[in-house]
Amino acid sequence: MAELLTIALLFSTIRLATPLILAAIGGLFSERSGVINIALEGMMLAGAFTAAAVTHGVGNPYVGLAAGMAAGLLVALIHAVACIRYRADQVVTGTAINILMIGMPAFLSGALFLSSGSTPQIPKDQLLPYFPIVVAFCLVPIAWYVLYRTPFGLRLRAVGENPEAADAAGVRVIRMRYWGVLLSGVLAGIGGAYLSVGQSSLFTRNMTSGRGFIALAALIFGKWRPVQTMLACLLFGFTEALTIQMQGVVKLPSGEDIPVQFIQMVPYILTVIVLAGFIGSSRPPKALGIPYQKER
Amino acid sequence: MKLLRELFFPLLAVVAAFIVAALLILAVGDNPISAYRLLFGAAFSWPDGIGYTLFYATPLIFTGLAVLVAFRCGLLNIGAEGQLYIAAFATAWVGITFAQRSAWLLLPLCFIVAIVAGGLWGAIPGILKARFGSHEVINTIMLNFIAVALASYFTQYHYKIPGDPIMQTGPIGPGAHIARLGKFIPGLPERIPLNLAFILALLCCVLVYLFLWRTKWGYELRATGTNPTAAEYGGISVRKQIVIAMTISGALAGMVAINEVLGYRYRYYDGFSDNYGFTGIAVALLGRNHPFGVVLAALLFAILQRGGIHVDGFSEYVTKDIVQVLQGTIILFVACEAFFSGQFARFGLMRRSKV
């Protein structure tokens, strides 16, 4: 076991936690403003595809990253307009976006690159292996500061807890919720972009493979707070890193492999337990999921 | 008149989605009309087109009904995917373990296991919500992943035939097979996997309708969905209704196993579900959360699924992924359209119960 707990495992953990942190902190802004965001997965996919396609096109990963952010923003705008303006059910809209975003990038890849859903390989010198990691870890203190030490953060939290009171105090509820959702799109877009032009060198069909949901799990496990959420992301990143490292190396006493499926389940089981209140209580923002309508 | 109105908005959403997708097809330089002709043309040929379309519709009717029952109680079950995986594995397990038994014993046992396994997996988020107030949406998402991992673990480590490169279990006993409809319908070859589960799905539609609108239990369930506070005052235990609704919902999703394991592959095949659980949400919404609407919506999505394969093969730029784009767009429009027509409150979605 000792040889496993190496520097390599640590780096692997940080690398794997990065997209989770970006998406989870994004989700934090959205959910703290009162809008459920199960569309993180779709937003990440949009970011991942666009970043890879644009980087392939122009040869500059920073442009690709910016395009990925824009794509995340666009998807978030759909979610925001549907949920805030038209007061559609936030979970249904999120599900629709996730289905749409499994299809859309694959459809566009198929049409643009005549592939079966992936973008062409990007040369190694056009990748961004470290920059998004720095962004992710800088983001956490920034998110904490914005949320707890600025008027913007106070208003954002207020509309998520008690929109009527916030409205009475002069806060523009609708506008704050748009900010929350759009921020989540931009950040999840960076998270997705890191997957395609950072960790790997192309977009493949459904390449997030549930990371948006793990980010959501981390957000709940972290009790909707930035630092705890980051720690949850690191924990989940660690379990994933462990899964990869252990494959075929560590054996049970009986000589069998340790089934990866059990390690994969850890984040999900922990989330269910935490949400039920067995390990401290994880309380969502009070107005989460309830559309706001100004009284007339 | 009422029927027309009920049909109007879903149709509008579907047409709008097709227009959006047509613009997308134009944008990538292909012809939307020829693409749509391929998409729909494939579904109506006899026997292959119709046979496969009805076969694809079968799991969608089950998952659509599953989502519907939960919806009517004010719950959103996005865990049908996990429920059907657990049920499929459990069914295959029984079919393998008791393979030597006669059909008289094995077949009912497999049916019961499919329903009970799905129901139990569905009951978990119900109990968690009723007991601890934790949100069923998050829990069902998490349980989906857990279900897939569990089924995959047991398949890989315990029930795979050694040396088989495919992630699947060994075959179930012949006693657990259910007949394909080709056996009864002249002209329908038995290679088409459409089976008795389709008839069962239609039967379930009628049963769900009778249950929800013709029994006291269905009334209590719907009352909880429409207004949990009033229901509680009226002497209905909201917590109990939540558990009941999620259990029935899971059981309906579990019946997908009957189509998949007993009627089609005769084994558990890892990753068999083509997002049936999530498409079920689209089916229920588009079907106006009514059992008969669910059948129509399931048929539409089945046609698209069948057509997607043809589009993939015969058009230059358009791939089968257009089907998912259409599905997502349809749900988006249905979700937003409900606001305009003021129908949403009726489904109890706006007033999700807070226990």
Image: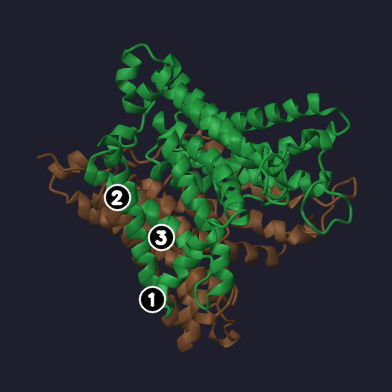
Residue at the (32%, 37%) spot, across then down: A286
Q: What residue is shown with label 2?
A: B336
Q: Position of residue B269 (x, y in %)?
A: 73, 49
Count of numbered circles on the image: 3
Q: Nearer the viewer, mark 2 or mark 3?
A: 2
Q: Nearer the viewer, residue A165 or B277?
A: B277
- Regarding residue A150, the answer to whether it shows in the image is no
Provide the letter of the chain coloured brown.
Answer: A
Q: Which residue is mark 1?
A: B26
Mark 2 and mark 3 in contact? Answer it, CB < 8 Å: no
For label 3, count other residues whose C-alpha is less than 10 Å away and answer few (under 14), some (14-19) or many (20+): few
Of circles 3 and 1, which is in front?
Answer: 1
Relative vertical location of residue A294 with respect to residue B219 in this rendering, above or below: below
From the top left corner, tell me how far across and down residue B56 is, in percent: 58, 49
Q: CA distance from mark 2 to mark 3?
A: 36 Å
Q: Nearer the viewer, residue A110 or A66?
A: A110
| Chain B display color | green
Identify which amino acid the numbered label 3 is placed on: Pro
Camera-nearest label, 2 or 1 = 1
Q: Secondary structure at mark 1?
A: helix
Report the residue that reaches farthest toward the top: B235
Three-letter amino acid code at the position of disc 2: Cys
Residue at mark 3: A141
